[in-house]
Image (cartoon, grey):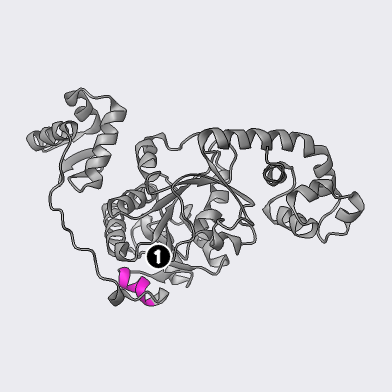
Amino acid sequence: MDELRISQIAITSIPNIGDVTAKKLIAYCGSATQVFKEKKQALEKIPGVGGLVINALNSGKKEAFLIAESELKQAEHNNHKIYFYLDEDYPQRLFHCEDGPVILYAKGNTNFNVDRVVSIVGTRNPTDYGKSFCEQLLEDLAPYQPLIISGLAYGIDGVAHKAALKHKLSTIGVLAHGLDQLYPTQHKALSEKMLENGGLISDFKVGTKPDRENFPKRNRIVAGLSDLTMVVESSKKGGSLITAHIANNYNRDVFAVPGKLSDKQSEGCNNLIKTNKAALIESVKDIEYIMGWQAEAIAKPVQTQMFVALTPEQKVLTALLAKTGQLTIDQIALNAQFTMSHTAALLLELEFSGIIKLLPGKVYRLV
């Protein structure tokens, strides 16, 4: 097996050694492999590296290499990509973040180093206003062909990923767990679509569960991958504010969608704007102005296909909705006599094609 790659993964499995310390060790020793071969006397001379780290390297080396070998086998078996922070194709925007991950695991069709990258985060319980704003923003951003980053969570994250795919934009979901699982499971069909034009990434190893403490750590990747972070609705203490705070610390631009003073879902965004931690955004023109994107140089694509050819199974679903007006996903699956997972996949395809619309309560209707 690849000794260097195993060493690169192993260093992320040593207790008491985080991304910042790992990078420092690699910089002084010359490589991840050399870190494990370096003598104690040489390690003691590295600034900020004390006995706790040195002892951890010695006592945790054997187990760390076993974990790394297993992780590499899993990656090869499942066709997962592994990015080390010094690799040429590692996300260059993350490279400039001090606490950026030493190792990233990815699957799908990912290209991080495109000209424009936008992160979109927000509440898990968005209003119709928030969802509509997010969808319109993605439509207006489409001419610039940005890569769209979010966390594949409920709410605004899911809205952003879906809208990106609808407008043929690459989109990447940053996970708070290993690539061998998916949270929330309701986004399974969406995640599979994302693999075709984007993908899923994580700095957590296979087997890592979506524990609460993983989400703030995940947020640094969401913020670090992008040129700007957009907050679309957030309560006063919403998790999206952590991402905005990290983006500010990375000296990245932050935008927030304003809302009514009485709206609990807008308290976080309004406060970001009030404290000058985010620029107020009303439309894509604000991004064009602040980011220096020249809208006039990019012509909006012309829609050349007004009608989409439906498969027989898609026709069954649209016929049901045409007859009834609107139905829940359970009602659709029951009437069509399809499995729930297959129904969800078909509905997602129709939603991407702009034929149906998802309403609150998982109710669907024709557009």
Magenta range is 284-289
Q: Residue furthest front?
A: 1
Answer above or below: position of 207 versus 250: above
Q: Where is residue 263 drawn, in percent x and y? A: 34, 58
The foreground one among 360 and 196 is 196
Q: Is residue 319 left or right of residue 165?
A: left
**Prevalent SS, magenta region:** helix
Q: Is residue 313 magenta?
A: no
Q: Is residue 287 magenta?
A: yes
Answer above or below: position of 365 versus 98: above
The foreground one among 263 and 251 is 251
Residue 333 placement: quadrant = top left
Q: Is residue 237 left or right of residue 27?
A: left
Q: Where is residue 114 drawn, in percent x and y? A: 45, 62
Q: Where is residue 7 drawn, in percent x and y? A: 72, 44
Q: Residue furthest left?
A: 323
What is the crowding at mark 1: few (fewer than 14 residues within 10 Å), some, or many (at least 20)? many
The N terminus appears in which quarter of the rendering? top right
Q: Is residue 124 visible?
A: yes
The residue positioned 15% from the left and 53% from the top of the image is 305
Which amino acid type is marked by label 1? Ala
Residue pointed to by mark 1: 256
Q: Where is residue 223 drawn, in percent x and y? A: 51, 59
Residue 319 placement: quadrant = top left
Q: Which secondary structure, mark 1? A: strand
The residue positioned 33% from the left and 50% from the top of the image is 159
The residue positioned 46% from the left and 51% from the top of the image is 110
Q: Is residue 282 visible?
A: no
The residue positioned 75% from the left and 53% from the top of the image is 31
